[in-house]
């Protein structure tokens, strides 16, 4: 029996944590929620610098998304950039993906 997917539902950010783990290192933990279907967690470690923290958070988010997609998609963080606009900071992430041996950017 095929499962029915409700494409109108969205993953929502449930929790985010960024901590310094050792001198010069940090760890990001991202929790994405999908209603009653549970939470999807991603964890990544990286350099404890402004750009390293952004990349670490992006990699943890990509990992949580892979888990939500039941490992049917592989995501790779290509670049991360913080841009200031409209009196706020926007983070832009470029991802590469692979689905069933088909790679896209």
Image (cartoon, rainbow, N blue to C red):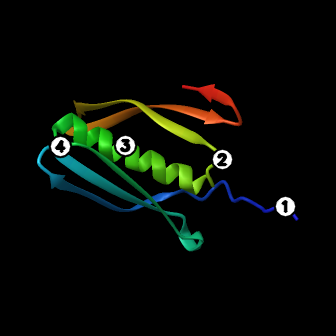
The x, y position of residue 79, in whole percent, is: 37, 28
Q: CA distance from mark 1 to mark 3?
A: 32 Å
Label located before the other in sequence (4 or 2): 4
Q: Which residue is mark 3?
A: 58
Alpha carbon distance from label 1 to label 4:
45 Å
Q: Which type of secondary structure does the marked residue at label 4 adopt?
A: loop
- Under circle 2, the secondary element is loop
Element under disc 3:
helix
Q: x and y percent of residue 38 in the render?
A: 54, 70
Residue at far bottom of view: 36
Q: Disc 1 vs disc 2: which is toward the camera?
A: 2
Lower position in the chain sequence, tag 1 or tag 3? 1
- Number of other residues with Cα within 10 Å of mark 4, as a class: few under 14, some 14 to 19, many 20 or more: many
Of callouts 1 and 2, the N-terminal one = 1
Residue at numbered disc 2: 72
The tag earlier along the polypeptide, 4 or 3, is: 4
- Quadrant location of residue 13? bottom left
* Cα gap from disc 4 to disc 2, whole angstroms: 31 Å
Mark 1 Cα shell of 10 Å, populated few (<14), some (14-19), many (≥20):
few
Q: Residue at x 17, y 38 (%)?
A: 50
Depth check: give the residue in front, 22 or 10: 22
Q: Is residue 95 left or right of residue 51?
A: right
> Disc 4 and disc 3: Cα gap in Å?
14 Å
Residue 62, percent from left and from top: 46, 45
Q: Do callouts 1 and 4 mark residues in contact (Cβ within 8 Å)?
A: no
Residue drawn at (62%, 27%), measured in percent from left and top?
Answer: 103
- Residues at marks 1 and 3 touching, judged by CB atoms closer than 8 Å: no
Tags 4 and 3 touching, CB below 8 Å:
no
Residue 2, labelled with which disc?
1
Mark 2 Cα-neighbour bin, 10 Å: few <14, some 14–19, many ≥20: few
Please state, as top left, top right, bottom left or bottom right, where the N terminus lies in the image: bottom right
Q: In whole angstroms, how far apart are the C-alphas of marks 1 and 2?
A: 16 Å
């Amino acid at each position: 029996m095929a499962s029915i997917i409700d494409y109108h539902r969205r993953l929502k950010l449930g929790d985010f944590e960024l901590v310094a783990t050792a001198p010069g290192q940090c760890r990001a933990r991202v929790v994405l929620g999908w209603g009653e279907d549970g939470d999807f967690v991603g964890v990544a470690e990286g350099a404890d610098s402004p750009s390293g923290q952004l990349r670490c958070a992006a990699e943890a988010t990509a990992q949580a998304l892979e888990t939500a997609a039941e490992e049917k998609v592989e995501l790779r963080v290509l670049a991360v950039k913080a841009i200031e606009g409209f009196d706020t900071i926007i983070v832009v992430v470029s991802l590469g993906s692979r689905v069933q041996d088909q790679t896209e950017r």
